[in-house]
Image (cartoon, grey):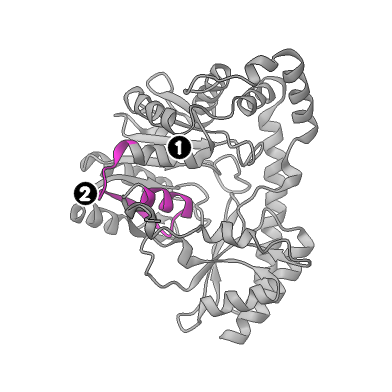
Amino acid sequence: MNVSEKMKNMKPSAIREIFKSLGTPGAISFAGGNPAPESFPVEALADIAADIFKTNASAALQYSVTEGYPMLREQVAARLHNKFGIDTERNTTIITSGGQQAIELTCKVLCNEGDEVICENPSFIGALNAFRSLGARPIGVELEEDGINLAKLEETIKTHPKARFLYLIPTFHNPAGITMSLEKRRAVYALAQQYDLVILEDNPYGDLRFSGDELPTLKSMDTDGRVIYCGTFSKILSAGMRVGFACGTDELVQKMVVAKQVEDVHTNIFFQMMCAEYIRRYDLDAHIETIRALYREKCERMLSALDAHMPKEVSYTRPQGGLFLWCTLPEHVDVAALIKEAAAEKIFVVTGAAFQCDEAATTHSFRLNYSMPSLLDIDNGIKLLADIIRRHL
């Protein structure tokens, strides 16, 4: 069978492939990006589901509008305005099948085959693969401790005229765990204005700050409709619901609506209704505070374990929120061999190579997740991982 040129060289997600190994008894995984199961409001969602089937089953089981469940769209718009400073009177929202679809739809609407997307390097593997699957090439710009390298960003914009937009995760970056400074946010937006470049701001973790000061979104700075903002309920209600959203100019969102009609007609309406009812009945921000406290404890536990056990030659980021931190090893260490050895000892991490814009690039880093493992697994797993790394130094 002849496979299309677009898909012929596509590789499966390294993270999704690791999931197949996690049923191994005694495995400790720092590889996933899942929210902690204990963060799900199970009892509340069970009550809501029962009530929907009792009082509104026909709507929950029927086709619906592509733009999204009207009450949920209104709630999302209100939250974007009140919590993230976004002018929703001059922008339109669409409900998507997770934040992943919002990213893919943006690329589908903006890019032609052979176009380019400027990204932070490293960057979210789901976004990179979405761009590649549509025939767009990710172009990486290195990250610094406070966000993307501005000088290299401007140079890249100048030397890549086929770049259609700039993809950024400014807050609690995946995989790097860093947050872009306020100064850089302003500078990045100014560069986008200067060179007439669209920005896709991906903010799936923005609610999950557990230390430091809140920073404005790029979309809240947007005065000329060049920022598309996407988010999700995956990290604050349920990842399995696959309910996300995008916010942008009406012209752009209407094109996303047409593209979405071709893909899935509409996002699962039952789960949209559940999200809307949860927001209507319960205090979503109070629920988010419990998640923040949970991840604060887990992140602090992982950092303490790293500080106690990791050789001094290993550096790692110290997140203020989100789900991840990024470890970097000396250049002489064979990271692929190290990760393979760790997996043989039932410790799973994701190689930094999976997050590179250039798939042929080498890397000396790997990503750690702290939201899924227990506190005991964090203690034991980091100690074992440090012992393995020490053997490779």
Residue 120 within the magenta-colored segment of the rendering: yes
What residue does disc 2 label?
162
- Which of the 4 image quadrants contains residue 222? top left
The residue under the point 52% across, 22% down is 73
The residue under the point 30% across, 38% down is 110
In front of the other: 113 or 70: 113
Q: Is residue 322 left or right of residue 84?
A: right
Secondary-structure class at tag 2: loop
Task: Tell me where residue 301 appears, x and y as whole percent.
Answer: 71, 61
Q: What residue type is labelled 1?
A: Ala
Task: Tell me where residue 368 appears, x and y as whole percent.
Answer: 60, 62
In front of the other: 349 or 134: 134
Q: Distance between the residues labelled 1 and 2?
A: 22 Å
Q: Dot 1 surroundings within 10 Å: few (below 14), some, or many (20 or more)?
A: many
Q: Which amino acid does label 2 sit on?
A: Lys
What residue does disc 1 label?
102
- The answer to whether residue 240 is seen in the rendering is yes
Residue 177 within the magenta-colored segment of the rendering: no
Instruction: Please tell me whether residue 151 is drawn above or below residue 198 in the rendered image.
Output: below
Q: In this view, does 9 lie to the left or right of 32?
A: left
Q: Dot 2 surroundings within 10 Å: few (below 14), some, or many (20 or more)?
A: some
In front of the other: 295 or 108: 108
Q: Is residue 153 left or right of residue 216?
A: left
Task: Tell me where residue 367 appears, x and y as whole percent.
Answer: 55, 63
Q: On the rendered image, what quadrant is the N terminus found in?
A: bottom left
Q: Magenta span covers which residues?
A: 109-133
- The answer to whether residue 218 is seen in the rendering is no
Q: Residue 112 carries which label?
A: none
In the orientation shown, which residue stands out farthest toward the top?
55
Task: Tell me where residue 330 appears, x and y as whole percent.
Answer: 49, 79
